[in-house]
Image (cartoon, rainbow, N blue to C red):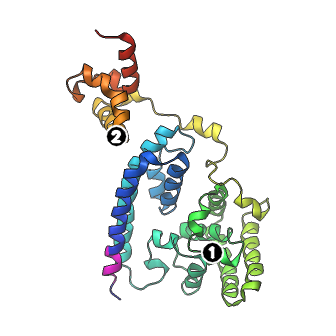
């Protein structure tokens, strides 16, 4: 089967999505910004996710999250395109030939059906994600829902479950997979009225494996609550870096990135005093680059020279 048309269609979509998201960042709420990071980060392997999210926290101030998303989207786009290029070279049409985004947009039912044909098709990280998603399948409808993966990331427990599964040894993770596969095949064959009961057994099997000590329905609590939970300590641990260590060139790039996120009115209000004071952007001293809006206020307070 020729993958060319599908690949080109996906490549165009990834590029157009990047353009659309970057054009609407200033209109996004904080929840929308954090959700965007979660959706994309959930499509990254562990190494890429660690590198891309270095220094990021959902407890940061809104403006800092907004600036992070503006830099993260292009970075993620390149990784998504690279994943697409790699999977283009994989023969066949099973799970191992699908990109992370394709996996994210499939139902649990379809993925576990395909996994039964090739038990080693998923990496350990991918397998942990699929097991975490299964815990949110409290009905047969959700098991077959194409949007469940997107919905699950709203809940902090989805990420906590993955962390718990990551503490299992590779052997225990494979053993859990092998216990689940026959049960997912039972779901495929069962009438809808019996499928919910089998799914409950699957969810309980995963819960036992990670020693989950709370009711399964509690996993659906706290939609879009900040992660990880316990934010006071996290916010302190991820305090903003000390800007004086940045070089002049880095400060200029940082200010330019922030101005790209401003509306015309915001730029006029915040930066006009600097524009009146300095002939060129490159004439602005480092002290004012550290806090351009503060410099504007200081200039206004001082009055005309």
6 inside magenta stretch: yes
123 inside magenta stretch: no
Mark 2 nearby-residue class (10 Å; few <14, some 14–19, many ≥20): some
Depth check, front residue: 293 or 272: 272
Q: How far across and down, in percent of the image, does residue 120 sit?
A: 54, 79
Q: Main secondary structure of the magenta part?
A: helix
Within the image, what quadrant is residue 19 found in? Answer: bottom left
Q: How far across and down, in percent of the image, does residue 202 sit?
A: 72, 76
Q: SS for tag 2?
A: helix
Left or right, 152 with respect to 7, comes to: right
The label number, if any, that marks residue 150 in the structure image: none
Q: Which residues are magenta?
A: 3-8
Identify the residue position indicated by label 1 in the image. Answer: 174
- Report the residue at 38% width, 29% height from top: 245
Which numbered disc flags the more N-terminal residue, 2 or 1? 1
Identify the residue position indicated by label 2 in the image. Answer: 257
Residue 242 against residue 165 in the figure, above or below = above
Quadrant containing the C terminus in the rendered view = top left
Residue 238 against residue 35 in the figure, above or below = above
Depth check, front residue: 25 or 136: 25
Depth check, front residue: 168 or 135: 135
- Report the residue at 64% width, 37% height from top: 232
Tell me the CA gap for discs 2 and 1: 45 Å
Mark 1 nearby-residue class (10 Å; few <14, some 14–19, many ≥20): some
- Report the residue at 71% width, 75% height from top: 139
């Amino acid at each position: 089967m020729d993958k060319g048309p599908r690949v080109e269609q996906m490549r165009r979509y990834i590029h157009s999505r990047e353009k659309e998201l970057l054009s609407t960042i200033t209109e996004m709420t904080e929840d929308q910004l954090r959700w965007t990071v979660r959706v994309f980060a959930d499509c990254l392997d562990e190494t890429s996710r660690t590198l891309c999210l270095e220094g990021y926290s959902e407890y940061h101030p809104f403006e800092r999250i907004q600036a992070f998303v503006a830099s993260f989207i292009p970075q993620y786009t390149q990784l998504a395109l690279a994943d697409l290029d790699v999977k283009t070279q994989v023969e066949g049409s099973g799970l191992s030939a699908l990109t992370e985004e394709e996996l994210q947009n499939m139902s649990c039912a379809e993925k576990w059906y395909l996994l039964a044909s090739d038990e080693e098709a998923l990496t350990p990280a991918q397998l942990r994600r699929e097991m975490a998603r299964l815990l949110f399948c409290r009905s047969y409808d959700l098991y077959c829902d194409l949007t469940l993966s997107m919905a699950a990331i709203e809940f902090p427990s989805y990420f906590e479950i993955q962390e718990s599964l990551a503490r299992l040894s590779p052997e225990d993770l494979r053993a859990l997979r092998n216990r689940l596969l026959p049960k997912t095949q039972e779901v495929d064959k069962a009438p809808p009225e019996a499928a919910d009961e089998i799914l409950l057994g699957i969810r309980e099997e995963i819960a036992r494996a990670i020693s989950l000590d709370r009711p399964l329905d509690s996993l659906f609590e706290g939609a879009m609550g900040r992660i990880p939970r316990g934010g006071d300590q996290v916010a302190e641990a991820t305090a903003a870096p000390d800007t004086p260590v940045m070089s002049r060139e880095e400060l200029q790039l940082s200010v330019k990135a922030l101005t790209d996120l401003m509306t015309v009115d915001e730029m006029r209000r915040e930066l006009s005093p600097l524009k009146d004071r300095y002939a060129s952007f490159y004439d602005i001293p480092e002290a004012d680059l550290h806090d351009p809006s503060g410099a504007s206020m200081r200039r206004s307070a001082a009055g005309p020279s």
